[in-house]
Amino acid sequence: MSRAVPPAGRVVIAPDKFKGTLRSADAAASIATGIRRVIPEAELYELPIADGGEGTVDAALAAGYRELRVPVTGPTGQPREAAIAISGGTAIVESAQACGLALLPGGTPAPLTATSYGAGELIRHAIEAGCTRVILGLGGSACTDGGAGMAQALGARLRDCAGADLPRGGAALGDLDDLRLKPLSDLVSGVEIILACDVTSPLCGDHGAAAVYGPQKGASPQDVMVLDAALRQWADVVRRRTGVDRSGTRGAGAAGGIGFAGLALLGARIQPGIAVLLGLLGFDQAVRGARLIVTGEGCLDAQTLNGKAPAGIAAAAATAGVPVAAVAGRVELSEHEWREAGFCAAYSLTDLASPDEDHLARAGELAERAGARLAADWLQ
């Protein structure tokens, strides 16, 4: 999707969400307000971004994509509504809106029975809306079902040795005997599907979806063993049906194994989330001729350096020859580390808060202060 190129000298404000406190668009607006407090005439270009996880659809909508609201099935079967961002024939969806941890009723984990069914419904809705390219942002899922629920929603039939359809959830895959794919294959034929994620885990084993991420979803050590064995059975049946084994592919374990089903059954490609989003949101055009880029997220830490949005922004900014500053709720990297990562400055909201201020409740105001401080340091 094309956007107008900002004039030379403009400041591009491109933060990710501050998880739990500010959406990316709100963070960008707050930082912009702070900059204008110091330099009223500043030319600012707000470009909220995301790395493929939660907030990806919001970033696309802020960039001008059209919103389509659709009904989906939550991780434990409860109905809910989710958003799809559409531009031309491209749809952007995110698994967190259909099967995310935040959607568990009462926050109660369901590691053995949670399903990715809603992620498949999102893809189906996008295809039925006429889209021929679907970007699925992976991350934050409550399920460890190898993407089997997603496949079921798209028409696949999973059956046990008695010919009965399997119930949803990862544990049920231990009873899988047969897989029918034709309705799914017909539906996704001619549709390009891209999985936007930065997870590199395989589907099974000590570094797989159950072992690494299962405990975060409430899985006990026994649950992890059950889920890993079930995922191995799922992978074996898929291999027998398709003739290809994608269980060891980097990223197959993403979002509880949704990555595996995308690769093995949908013909999808995995790409780094931030690279996908920067391309879709027209980042290269936005920074052409800019004097400064401001990015940020909730916490600038070691995870930032492993493909998170601000690190992706810093790498892209270096290619464009534009300095980039970071604003974050907390800055846990040392100055040496964040400078090595490509940032010319890093501002922490916690450092800007007074001792009696709740920095989470006042994140917007503190982001304004960071914008003002940044403007005084770098733009005057």
Image (cartoon, rainbow, N blue to C red):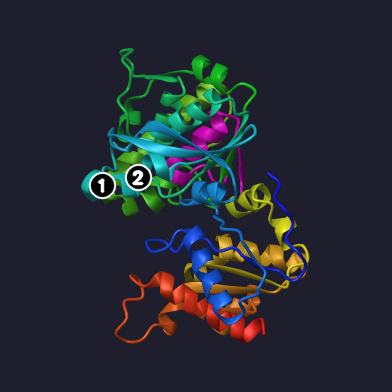
Is 266 part of what is drawn in magenta? yes
Q: In the rendered image, is residue 176 in sight?
A: yes
Q: Secondary structure at mark 1?
A: loop
Relative placement, left or right, of 224 versus 296 is left
Q: Are marks 2 and 1 in contact (CB under 8 Å)?
A: yes
Pointer 2 or 1: first along the chain:
1
Quadrant location, the N terminus: top right
Nearest the viewer among 92 and 186 is: 92
Nearest the viewer among 224 and 270 is: 270
In which quadrant of the rendered view does residue 284 lie? bottom right
Q: Which residue sits at x=50%, y=49%?
A: 58
Residue on which the image places disc 2: 142
Image: 275 above or below 253: below
Residue found farthest to the front: 41
Residue on which the image places disc 1: 109
What amino acid is labelled 2 in the image?
Ala
Label 1 Cα crowd, 10 Å radius (few <14 / some 14-19 / many 20+): many
Is 87 part of what is drawn in magenta? no
Image: 163 above or below 66: above
Whole-angstrom CA distance, mark 2 to mark 1, is 7 Å
Relative placement, left or right, of 72 versus 309 is left
Q: Which residues are magenta?
A: 250-271
What amino acid is labelled 1 in the image?
Pro
Q: Position of residue 234 (x, y in %)?
A: 42, 30
Quadrant location, the C terminus: bottom right
Q: Position of residue 153 (x, y in %)?
A: 42, 25
Q: Which residue sits at x=32%, y=38%?
A: 75
